[in-house]
């Protein structure tokens, strides 16, 4: 009997089917997502960039930020952080839901779709949300006249790279945990918050005590922020450091995704 189901097509494009399913689920929350992706940037730009920025400018001018206005200095970091927080939502909660809360992945894996394809599909959908968050934030930066349109557009891919690298690693850990009791608290307090505070977000990483600087060195936020600052206002980063930043972010994304695909396969094979 012909069921009308193209099994070879499903097997070939399984990742895209999963991504489409995830995007439909994300769109159910489009109003909340839009409010968060617009509200958070406005809050930070007004409270941190303009409010605290005025105090910084009045106290030390632009001497501590390399001659750059404070709000412009922190803008690339805020842009990259928006990518990280956006991808965090879409790479952690859906994975735990798929493996434990609703066990959707096991049903999907009962079709010709493989565990690797499920991982890739979830990842692609998460990146789509990240791209939206970053674009909204960048448009607000333009509206606030924080950056000039032109070469600063390169801030967009560097911020997306931050989300891609962090999201891939977090997806692996989300797929690995069996009990999520303290997982969200640990990630929020011991990973997200220290990364945000100690990755050169509000002042150059070199001004921090040397024993805290390694937090930035291993943080995708710092690497993306440095690239974003170079793109936005020619921050003076050497070609070698630009290459190091790009290699770090790329390697983290690839490694995290490969580990995630393997972990999906292992867990679904139980």
Image (cartoon, rainbow, N blue to C red):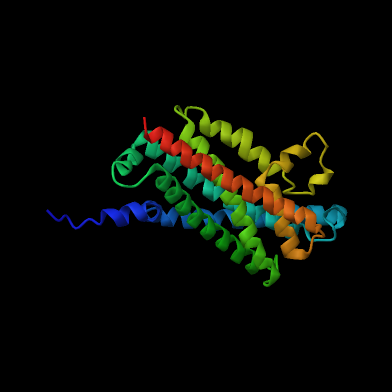
Would residue 128 appear left or right of 56 to someone viewing this image? left
In depth, the one of 249 and 235 nearer the eye is 249
Q: Who's the residue at 61% across and 40% down the image? A: 192
Q: Who's the residue at 75% across and 47% down the image? A: 200
Give percent across and percent down for residue 132: 51, 60
Would residue 136 appear left or right of 221 to someone viewing this image? left
Residue 50 seen anywhere in this rendered image of the structure:
no
Give percent across and percent down for residue 247: 68, 51
Residue sticking out furthest to the left: 1
In depth, the one of 229 and 113 nearer the eye is 113
210 w.r.t. 37: above or below: above
Q: Who's the residue at 41% across and 33% down the image? A: 267
Residue 236, by quadrant, is bottom right
Q: Quadrant of the C terminus?
A: top left
Give percent across and percent down for residue 116: 43, 44
Residue sticking out furthest to the bottom: 150
In depth, the one of 187 and 43 nearer the eye is 187
Label tally: 0
253 w.r.t. 156: above or below: above
Give percent across and percent down for residue 9: 31, 57
Residue sticking out furthest to the front: 8
């Amino acid at each position: 009997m012909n069921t009308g189901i193209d099994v070879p097509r499903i097997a070939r494009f399984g990742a895209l089917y999963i991504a489409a399913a995830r995007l439909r689920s994300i769109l159910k929350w489009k109003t909340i997502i839009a409010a968060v992706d617009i509200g958070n940037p406005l809050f930070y730009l007004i409270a941190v960039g303009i409010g605290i920025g005025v105090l910084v400018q009045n106290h030390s001018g632009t001497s501590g930020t390399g001659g750059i206005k404070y709000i412009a200095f922190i803008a690339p970091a805020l842009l990259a952080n928006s990518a990280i927080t956006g991808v965090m939502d879409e790479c952690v909660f859906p994975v735990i839901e798929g493996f434990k809360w609703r066990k959707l992945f096991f049903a999907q894996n009962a079709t010709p779709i493989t565990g690797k394809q499920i991982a890739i599909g979830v990842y692609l959908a998460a990146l789509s949300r990240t791209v939206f968050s970053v674009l909204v934030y960048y448009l607000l930066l333009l509206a606030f006249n924080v950056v000039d349109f032109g070469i600063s557009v390169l801030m967009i891919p560097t911020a997306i790279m931050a989300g891609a690298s962090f999201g891939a690693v977090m997806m692996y850990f989300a797929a690995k945990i069996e009990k999520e009791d303290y997982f969200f608290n640990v990630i929020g307090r011991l990973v997200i918050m220290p990364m945000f505070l100690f990755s050169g977000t509000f002042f150059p990483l070199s001004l921090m005590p040397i024993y805290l600087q390694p937090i930035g060195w291993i943080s995708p936020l710092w690497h993306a922020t440095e690239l974003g600052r170079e793109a936005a206002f020619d921050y003076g980063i050497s070609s070698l450091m630009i290459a190091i930043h790009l290699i770090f972010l790329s390697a983290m994304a690839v490694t995290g995704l490969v580990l995630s695909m393997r972990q999906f396969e292992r867990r679904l094979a139980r």
